[in-house]
Image: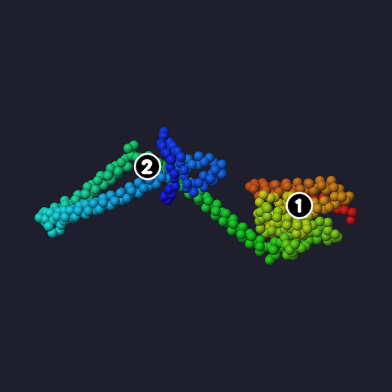
Amino acid sequence: MEAATPLPLQLGRVEVRAGAVLIADLIVADERFVDLIRQRIDQGDSPEDITRQALEIGARVLDRESTSVEVDFIRRELEKVSGEVERSFGERAQGVATELATQMEAAFGADGGAVAKALSGHSEQLAEQIATTFGSERSSAVQHQIKELVERSLRESQQNLVRLFSSAEGQNPLADFKASVVRELKAGREGDSALLEKVGALQLEVQRLRDAGEAEAEIDAERERGAGKGRTFEAIVFEAIERLADGRGDSAVHTGDSQAESGDKVGDVVVELDGATGAGRGRVVFEAKDKRLSRLDAWRELDAAMAVRNADFAILVVSSDAKIPARTEPLAEFQGNKMIVAFDKDDLDERGLDIAYRYARCKLLAERDSASVLDAAGVRAATEEAAAALRDTQKIRGHLTKATSGVSEAREVLEIMQTRIEAALARVESLIAAGDPG
């Protein structure tokens, strides 16, 4: 701490009264003090307050300097005393250690120690006692006694446990558990028997499905062999549609291998209605599939075929009833411009394909000629009758697949319904022909 610089004072009379200092005629000629007072007066402070503050601060500084001197003195004294104490303790500790070493040597020294002398005098007796107590060849050795006690305790504990857990009485803590295990084993044995019976039935079912799958594979192979000696299903569909189109003055074109302007090949057969006798009056596109599509994929295929081939109606032709998309019905109109029909390539029965073809043809021609002298009401009625007959036909087909009796009768009804459809479609065609100005 920097020591305070003494101020040049001219003292007058200084007295202490009632806890205060009275200074009379005090003159301070210190330059720094004078400058401070002058600056504070210029700032508007009271010179008496500034002088009072300077005296108070100076008194505190003098008090702190006095305290610091006392602390330094005490610290030096403590260091001096602690040094003396440390030297005295070290000397005493050295003396105690020397004395302790002397006593330990006298008691336990290898040459002249009291313990060594006592042990050497009784070494034979001590060796005999040790051998008797711990010798492995002595039956009275401690380790043999301990082993015998442990074995006896283990045998008793084992016997007690066997008696406890073999008892069927309530004192056996595992009595309930034992009884429940026995019950569960019996129930499990009975359940295993039932499970074995179910497994046997499942094995028979699996074998039946395997046989059915093999039969289906053989049927598919036979279908491939019978598909016109190398002809694809698409080619078979085209030949059938071409025969149907020639009989009605339509033109059928096999487009499955040709790209449209968009570059796509979707749409296997395109029929131009009345295209063989003049300008076309509508287009029907056929998509042939020898595999089963999902319902969503079927709609995508048909929508794409209509867009690519610029057609007004699309028909999906599948190679068997088993390949009709799920949640759809054959010979039923969907979304106003789509239909699905099964054309079995085993028997090549064209009646279903002919009905779908004629239905689409009549629908498009009726819509195209609605503004002519055509009997629109008659065409509409005949078309609705054909659609209703198509729905009834589908219901009968469903019954045929599930029926176990009365199949012959159902087939007769189906033949009647197909005749009804053909008659309704023929009536639509006649009405369209009658209303055609050409």
Q: Position of residue 304 (x, y in %)?
A: 73, 57
Q: Earlier in the sequence, mark 1 or mark 2?
A: 2
Q: Position of residue 79 (x, y in %)?
A: 31, 51
Mark 1 and mark 2: span between their CA atoms? 73 Å
Given the image, on which type of amino acid does mark 2 rest? Answer: Lys
Q: Nearer the viewer, residue 115 or 301?
A: 115
Q: Quadrant of residue 265?
A: bottom right
Q: Residue at x 68, y 55 (%)?
A: 297
Q: Residues within 10 Å of mark 2 (few under 14, many from 20)?
A: some
Q: Secondary structure at mark 2?
A: helix
Of all residues shown, which one is farthest toward the bottom? Answer: 230
Given the image, on which type of amino acid does mark 1 rest? Answer: Asn
Label at residue 178: 2
Find disc 1 in the rendering and name its residue.
Answer: 337
Q: Nearer the viewer, residue 52 or 427?
A: 52
| Residue 295 visible, this orientation | yes
